[in-house]
Image (cartoon, rainbow, N blue to C red):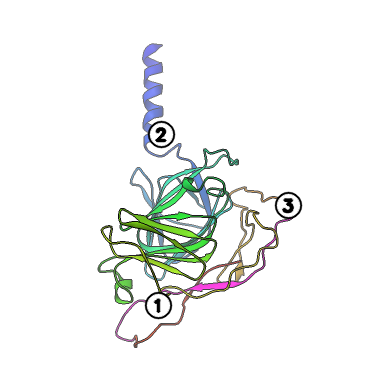
Amino acid sequence: MKNLTRVLFCLMVMLASHGIYADVAGHVQFVNGVVQLTTVAAQTRVLQKSDAVNEGDTLSSALAASAQIKMLDGGLISLRPDSRLKIDSYKFNGKQDGSEQGFFSLFKGGFRAVTGLIGQLNKNNYRIVTPAATIGIRGTDHETLVVAPGSVLAGLAPVGTYNKVNTGETSMTNDKGTISILPNQMGFVGAADQKPQLQPLNPNLFAVAAAPQARNAGAVRDSAVVDNSLEDVGTASGYTPPPNVGYSLRPITATFATPNPIVTAGPLPPIITVITF
């Protein structure tokens, strides 16, 4: 009996270490092109609509591919083309009791995040780590972008980490200092040994947009539009938003461009709609 108990315990440890019991972070609402998901057990599959995305998973989008994920806390993540994002830690039991947590690592490319309940009361429970800086939030809709050496975006902007705020406020921090970023401002840090700084908004990377008008402040978002078509938000995850929640719909477009011989000088037109509220 003792041997059987020991075997069952070891089996449970092995399953947990391979991500079988990993916390679900959200569900896929929309996929355009090829986006791959790699688990902590190094198993890779092509992401499909309604798939669960778990703590520890890494998302990698191909050129001209994108995906949108509805997080369990009501937040939204929209992954840009040619990006790699890892969900380092995600804890949410439906309550804001201090145990909630959303930690992400962005290695290259970018994503737009509309935060949900995680981070509303406990700001330190949400962060995005990049090679050059850590992004913190103050309750926000923001976009983080890492221009990696040799990437297609390196032809449009200097290498480094960028953060642009649509609503709310973010911070960029490394060993050299911290800056705060407000709506329609862009923060930049070239490397971990450089101080973060505010720069003029780069139209090759981000679009200027007016702040969305929320009819119910502080509520969890329950609707989104991707590529101008309504998606079944929340149905796959089983998440039920609180009643009387409403947000006006307004298209916000982020741009992505691939330098090639047919591209002329100057900003390129947007080719992918990220999220609409």
Q: Earlier in the sequence, mark 3 or mark 1?
A: 1
Please provide percent x and percent y for residue 247: 67, 63
Q: Earlier in the sequence, mark 3 or mark 2?
A: 2
Find disc 2 in the rendering and name its residue.
16
Disc 3, SS:
loop
> In which quadrant will I find the N terminus?
top left
Q: Is residue 224 left or right of residue 267?
A: right
Quick check: 17 above or below 256? Answer: above
Mark 1, Cα crowd under 10 Å, few <14 / some 14-19 / many 20+, is some
Q: Main secondary structure of the magenta part?
A: loop
Q: Work out whether residue 30 can be spotted.
A: no
Disc 3 residue type (three-letter): Pro
Residue furthest top in the image: 1
Q: CA distance from mark 3 to mark 1?
A: 39 Å
Q: Is residue 156 left or right of residue 140?
A: left
Quick check: 255 above or below 263? Answer: above
Res 213 quadrant in image: bottom right
Question: Which residue is located at x 38 percent, y 27 percent?
Answer: 11
Find disc 1 in the rendering and name its residue.
204
Please provide percent x and percent y for residue 62: 37, 65
Quick check: 115 above or below 200? Answer: above
Residue furthest right in the image: 244
Disc 1 residue type (three-letter): Asn
**The one of 87 and 206 positioned closer to us in this rendering:** 206
Q: Are marks 3 and 1 in contact (CB under 8 Å)?
A: no
Q: Which residues are magenta?
A: 243-262
Find disc 3 in the rendering and name its residue.
243
